[in-house]
Image: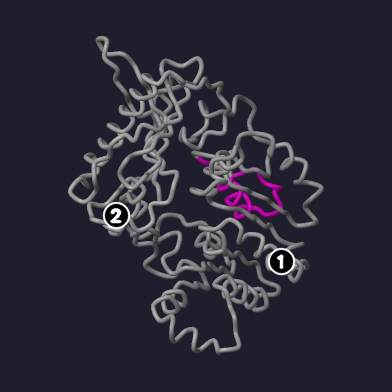
Amino acid sequence: MRIVLVYQWSLFGRENVKADWNKSTNCHGYLDEQGFLLSEFTKKGYASLMAEDWAQGVFNYPSCKGFQNPPTTHYMRPFQLHYEHHKRDSRKFQGIHQCLETQAFLYQYQDEFIKRYPKSSKIALTWTSNVAHDEPSNLFHYDGQMFNYFRKHRKEFDKSFVFFMGDHGLRFGSVRYTAIGRKELNNPMLVISVPRHLREKLVPTLQENADKLLTSYDTHASFKDILQDPTFESAPPQLAWGNSLFRRLPDGERSCRTLPIPLRFCMCEWNRTAVSEEKEKEEIGRLATELLNGRLREENITSSCQSFTYDGRAKIQLIVGTRGIHNVIFKTKQCGAFFSAIVRVEKDHGAPKASLISDDFTRTNSYGKTAECMNSRAELKPLCCCKSKNT
């Protein structure tokens, strides 16, 4: 789980702003008293469910404490822990004539949840990771299952708010390097359906807002809006960050200069000029590699991870109208690793000097087993090529 610590607004002539949470808040302490939305709905009388198709889970990955107590009325993690730690017995229990993929358990669980509370207010977070995280073509295999599930519960969903979404795009593979793949990497799909009786009231506003730059805080504010008043007769909740998507967004500029969006997540299109002069490319590639090695030293992982050496291959673009800000994709000799970052390159007494503008480096190909020495600090695995004979 990548934690954003600072919003780099200095690039736009504004002061940088620290994020509300840090690694200690998010990962090293329990989340029970941190205002988890599903827990807030539960306190208000909703039946609640949270289910995932892997044991570690969104709130525990990579090595986080997660929740000390079940955060919802129905919580699937105990089942997943048992299933993954005792796979042979679990599969034997299924029976030789059953062929169940991991996501099947999620939807069986949610089926029972819907049946158990036919007339009660309820909320469910059902998160499928295994279907296509590593292999995008599996989505086509999953299409029919998802379609049938929605059709099966059409009556229930017609009376519900449904948020159908992903958390990120493909981080490696050929799709990653297409125009849509680059956009989707940190800006995945979000589709919202609202109860039929509210569509005349809410859909025009949703359509208007869909054409504007939005943030995760706006999605969060939308859930808070539902929690406060699902009829939307009262004023929306006043929050430090974010605005409900069910209300008309405030007038004014909505850009990465005014909204809490880390630079590497920014959807704004800047004019860019490719750097083609080989000497300049070599210079910037080496400077970016030095910054990457600086991150290893900063995290104190150089005893486990190799220092990187620039491979000589890079795609570098100057962002037009800036003082030396470049989008850099480069390859290292160690582990054949590809990284991307936004870097400022300036002259300091005639010598080139680089600084990191994006909040971190992004690994753009799979690290696989070459980063296993970082299992205890898994958030750093993308930055590591372990010191071993195999790498």
Q: Which residues are magenta?
A: 219-239
Which residue occupies 65% across, 64% down? 142
Q: Is residue 223 magenta?
A: yes
Q: Give me the disc on residue 377.
A: 2
Q: From this view, report whether residue 17 is shown above or below residue 302.
A: above
- Residue assigned mark 1: 144
| Pick the front one: 13 or 299 | 299
Secondary structure at badge 1 equals helix
**Is residue 37 rendered to the left or right of residue 391?**
right
- Residue 281, quarter of the rendered image: top left
| Pick the front one: 18 or 122 | 18
Secondary structure at badge 2 equals helix
User: In the image, what residue type sits under mark 1?
Assistant: Gly
**Is residue 127 rendered to the left or right of residue 157?**
left
Q: From this view, report whether residue 227 is shown above or below residue 45.
A: above
Q: Where residue 292 appears, x then y in whole percent?
A: 30, 36
**Is residue 341 rendered to the left or right of residue 164?**
left
User: In the image, what residue type sits under mark 2?
Assistant: Arg
